[in-house]
Every structure is written in C-alpha cells, then in structure tokens.
Amino acid sequence: MTERIDDIEKAAGTLRAGGLVAFPTETVYGLGANAEDAAAVSRIFQVKGRPPSHPLIVHIGGAAQLDDWVEDVPETARLLAERFWPGPLTLVLRRSRRVPYEATGGLETVAVRVPDHPVALALLAAFGGGVTAPSANRFGNVSPTAADHVRAELGDAVDFVLDGGLCAVGVESTIVDVTGEAPSILRPGGVTREDLEAALGRPLAVPSTSGVRVPGQHPSHYAPRARVVLVEPERVVAEAEVAQRQGRRVGVFLPPSLAGAPVEAHAAVAVPGSMDAYARGLYGFLRELDQRGCELIIASLPREEGLGLAIANRLRRAAGPRPERL
Ligand code: AMP
Ligand code: MG
C-alpha cells in the first residue's frame, strides 16, 4: 500500500512537471497530461499520432469541480453528473477559459468526466487539477485495457505508467452532448442509452455512424492489425473455414450460440454471453488474435441494446475502411 501511495505521488509530480502519465480508468487506460499545460497536452497528440483537431476528455476528481472547467451548466448536465459520476459518462459542455484549445481541438466545447477507478481518483486528488486524456494507444488502434498493453504500445514515450489491473468496463465512455436543445449521444459507451433515457425521462437520438465529428466516429478506429470482417452469427464458422482453406490465418469470434462448436481456423475466442463480460474482454480478444498472427478476424455483431450498442459500434469501426497507414 505504501508503494501504491508512492506511485500516486510520483505520477502527480510527473503531471506537475509537464510529463505524461498513463493511468487506469474503469473504461480503458488513459494517456494523461495536466489539462492546463498546453505543451504537455500537445505531446499527447505527438505520442499518439493523433490529429490535433481531435479533442480530448478532461478528467476531474468530482462533480463539485465541474464549474471550474465549464460554463453554462444546464440542469440536464447536473442531473446526469449526479446520476452517473463517477462513471463511464462524458459530458460535452461549453469550455471555460481555463481549458486550452489544445485540449478541445480548437472547439468552444470541452468533454469532461469523473472516472470510477480508485487509482484514477487517487491520482486526480493528489494532483488537484484536471487531467486531459485520450486512450493510451496509437491513434486508430485497439484501446488498452491493461498496463502491459500501454507499455507494449507506447513504451518510453510515456513518463510514468500506473498499473491498476484490468479495466472493469473495457469500452470507452458514452459521450453525451448537453450543449444543444436536446441532449444527444455522440459515442455509445459504458453507460447504456437505456439508462440515460430512464434518467432523463425521454428518448435520445441514436448515434450517427456517418459523421466524423469525434475521433470515435472515424471509419477505421479501435482496429487490430488483422482485417476484421463482420458476418451474420450463423455464417461465422462457414466464412472462417472458407478463408482458412484459402490459406489465410483466420481468427474467429465464436458467438455464444455456437459455443464449443468445432471450427477449422488458426485461432478462436469464445464470445461471452454476458454483454458486461464481452465489453470487458473485447479489446483483449482483438489483441490476442493479433498476437497469434491472425490476418483476418471473422466476427458478428451482438444485439444493439445495452452495452451491445457500444460493442457493435467498436466492431463496426474495427471493420471500417482503413487509411493508407494500415
Ligand atoms: P478517445 O477516447 O481516445 O477517442 O478520446 C476522447 C473522446 O472524447 C474522443 O472521442 C473525442 O472526440 C471526444 N471529445 C472530446 N471533446 C469533445 C468535444 N468538445 N466535442 C465532442 N467530442 C469530444
Ligand atoms: Mg481512443
């Protein structure tokens, strides 16, 4: 325990000195910088290879700090913060001048959330300010859900890595824009649309899959090295076997309905029946199939309700058209 407190202090010191700290949250690992240090925030973009126009999330230690970072907080935002923080919900609000444009991609709005992870909360308390952080991976790749994923992908580019074990939720936060007339979901994530609608007492717009307003909406994102192909669940085995016989190294996401079915493929993962467990395991499964040398991953989409909406969103992005880089 003393060691842990020591690590938190070291990490907070690194942030104060303008360094980058990777830290666990309940969603995925974040690559954090002092939100008010424009130079440190800019380094995040360099390390990730992320276009500077793509805004980051400012992580704060509690809902009471919200007014330090944003202006004009509507009642809806207070209600959602009260109900879901700490937790995997990010609110987009009007930025206060305290937030540099480097963190907002030049926008007049800022994304804010309170993470629900003891290590993240301890870091925020020790540091005292806001920590701006995207996921701690290179732009477009699979997000890290373990400290080892961060070390393997970013190595020495990060000044300090806090290890908080595996992330409990496993997919990124739900982003809700509360600046307009009606709140809208910009990215589905760890808080379900159904729970948000129950809290608000009204329906929310289904997230668009066409725009590129936020990075999570790029055609290819959350993508492993292997190409991802989505088919109907009952076609998974047949499609995998055809490709495998053509000499490709095929990885399969075997849906729960086919648990234990024999499949002729290079590697297979059994998709959990529970959406909580699937979300928690999703990025690890994609990494595992990459590590086992798969060139192609055949998967199907879960039902798009509850956490299934976020899982399906990530799988669609993973299967999306890729820029030349890939
Ligand atoms: P990441 O999870 O790594 O993609 O990083 C943070 C997410 O928050 C991205 O999807 C951003 O687009 C989103 N975000 C941050 N600030 C804003 C904003 N002002 N408006 C819309 N989305 C935002
Ligand atoms: Mg990301």
Image (spheres, rainbow, N blue to C red):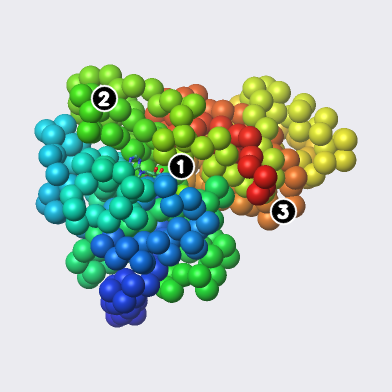
Residue 98 figure quarter? bottom left
- Picture layout, residue 163 above or below residue 67: below
Is 106 placed left or right of 303 in the picture?
Answer: left
Q: Nearer the viewer, residue 8 or 91?
A: 91
| Amino acid of disc 1 | Pro
Identify the disc placed on residue 67: none
Q: Which residue is mark 1?
A: 215
Q: Is residue 115 visible?
A: no
Q: Could you give the CA–CA distance between mark 1 and mark 2, rounded to whole angstroms?
A: 24 Å
Assign the N terminus to one quadrant of the image.
Answer: bottom left
Q: Secondary structure at mark 2?
A: helix
Residue at x 33% of width, y 72% of height: 18
Q: Where residue 315 sits: x, y (%)?
A: 56, 35
Q: Could you give the CA–CA distance between mark 3 and mark 1, rounded to whole angstroms?
A: 28 Å
Is ligand 1 within 8 Å of the beta carbon of the residue shown at mark 1?
Answer: yes
Q: Where residue 63 sits: x, y (%)?
A: 16, 49
Q: Nearer the viewer, residue 45 or 185?
A: 45
Q: Where residue 293 sits: x, y (%)?
A: 74, 52
Which of the two labelled residues, at mark 3 and mark 1, occupies the earlier sequence position? 1
Q: Quadrant of ligand 1?
A: top left
Residue at x 68% of width, y 32% of height: 229
Q: Which residue is mark 3?
A: 292
Q: Where residue 282 sits: x, y (%)?
A: 53, 43
* Residue projecting furthest to the top: 203
| Amino acid of disc 2 | Glu
- Picture layout, residue 9 above or below residue 224: below
Label 2: how many residues lie within 10 Å, few (<14), some (14-19) or many (20+)? few
Q: Which residue is mark 2?
A: 197
Label 1: how many residues lie within 10 Å, few (<14), some (14-19) or many (20+)? some
Residue 22 figure quarter? bottom left
Q: Secondary structure at mark 1?
A: helix
